[in-house]
């Protein structure tokens, strides 16, 4: 999807966003910000959402206090660092089903909030959102 340029920083920098997991009241606060110029997306985290977003497995496992190694493999780069491979769809579905009660308990009233850095106060809004979030990560 191509969107219009919303600020000068869209032209001179790589845009990015930060994603957060937070309670509904906090999520709705960010959703209602008038100066965000459509750069904040809020979605409830439901079982259907989790099924469709298996690439967010690290967030789910972090909040459930389960190691990533339970469902996926770590690939180490030759020099440094590495990444966790996205779990196969069938593995993810089985994981969600086997942990359904724990997921429903932990994710009750939690929302996914994606804040893009395309608006004037994005830095301050993102900094504030980190304080109230149960989990967050930067995206590029």
Image (tube, rainbow, N blue to C red):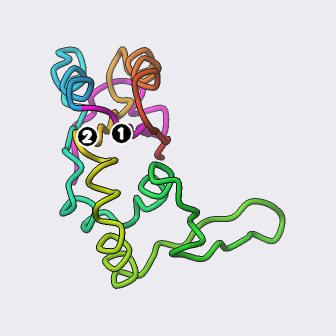
Q: Is residue 20 magenta?
A: yes
- Marks 1/2 in contact by CB < 8 Å: the verdict is yes
Q: Residues within 10 Å of mark 2 (few under 14, many from 20)?
A: many
- Residue 42 at what x, y percent from top left? 21, 38
**108 shown above or below 87:** above
- Give the extent of the magenta segment: 1-23
Q: Earlier in the sequence, mark 1 or mark 2?
A: 1
- Residue 46 at what x, y percent from top left? 20, 54
- Under circle 1, the secondary element is strand
- Under circle 2, the secondary element is strand
Question: Where is residue 79, by image quadrant?
Answer: bottom right
- Residue 49 at what x, y percent from top left? 22, 59
- Which numbered tag is attached to residue 21? 1
Distance (Cα) linking label 1 and label 2: 6 Å
Residue at 27%, 40% in the rendered image: 110
Residue at 29%, 73% in the rendered image: 97
Give the left or right position of residue 99, taking residue 46 as reference: right
Which sits in the foreground, 122 or 129? Answer: 129
On the rendered image, what quadrant is the N terminus found in? bottom left
Question: Where is residue 26, by image quadrant?
Answer: top left
**8 shown above or below 81:** above
Q: Which residue is mark 2?
A: 111
Residue at 29%, 61% in the rendered image: 101
Which sits in the foreground, 28 or 110? Answer: 110
Q: Is residue 111 magenta?
A: no
């Amino acid at each position: 999807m191509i969107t219009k340029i919303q600020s000068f920083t869209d032209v001179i920098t790589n845009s990015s966003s930060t994603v957060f997991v937070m309670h509904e009241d906090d999520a709705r606060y960010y959703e209602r910000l008038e100066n965000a110029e459509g750069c904040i997306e809020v979605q409830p985290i439901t079982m259907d959402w989790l099924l469709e977003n298996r690439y967010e497995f690290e967030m789910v496992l972090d909040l459930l206090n389960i190691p990533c190694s339970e469902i996926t493999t770590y690939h180490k780069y030759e020099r440094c660092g590495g990444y966790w491979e996205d779990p196969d769809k069938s593995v993810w579905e089985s994981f969600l089903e086997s942990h359904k009660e724990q997921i429903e308990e932990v994710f009750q009233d939690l929302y996914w909030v994606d804040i893009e850095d395309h608006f004037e106060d994005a830095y301050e809004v993102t900094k504030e959102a980190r304080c109230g979030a149960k989990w967050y990560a930067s995206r590029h």
